[in-house]
Amino acid sequence: MTYGALFWYYECPNCKKKFKYGTDLFAQFGDEFGNCPECGTAGTFIKEGAISVDDIEYEDVDY
């Protein structure tokens, strides 16, 4: 049984942007996984999970 995509949610401590990475992107981003797509700063981990009610607040980072 599958429950859908799994994401790691972050907030940038520098520019305050909220963003999420799909866990299927670990290999593609490597050491850059979790960095802000806007300014490149390492994001502060917020939570891990499937799509949630507040999901719309977080920008989806794509490769």
Image (cartoon, rainbow, N blue to C red):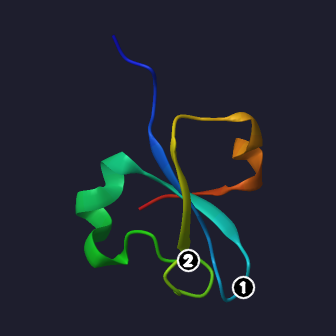
Q: Which one is in front, 57 or 37?
A: 57
Q: How many marks?
A: 2
39 over 36 or under it: above or below: below
Q: Amino acid at mark 1?
A: Cys
Left or right: residue 63 versus residue 52 is left
Q: Which one is in front, 12 or 28?
A: 12
27 over 44 or under it: above or below: above
Q: Residue at x 48, y 77 (%)?
A: 35
Left or right: residue 30 versus residue 50 is left
Q: Position of residue 6 (x, y in %)?
A: 44, 39
Q: Residue at x 53, y 87 (%)?
A: 41
Residue topped by disc 2: 36
> Which of the two labelled residues, at mark 2 and mark 1, occupies the earlier sequence position?
1
Q: Position of residue 5 (x, y in %)?
A: 45, 34
Q: Amino acid at mark 2?
A: Cys
Query: Badge 1: few (under 14), some or many (20 or more) residues near its Cα, within 10 Å?
Result: few
Q: Position of residue 28 (x, y in %)?
A: 27, 63
Q: Residue at x 66, y 35 (%)?
A: 52
Q: Residue at x 76, y 53 (%)?
A: 57
Do labels 2 and 1 touch, CB within 8 Å? yes
Kindly state the secondary structure of the residue where label 2 is placed. loop
Q: Quadrant of residue 11?
A: bottom right
Mark drawn on residue 62: none
Left or right: residue 40 versus residue 57 is left
Q: Position of residue 29 (x, y in %)?
A: 32, 68
- Give the farthest residue toward the top: 1
Residue topped by disc 1: 15
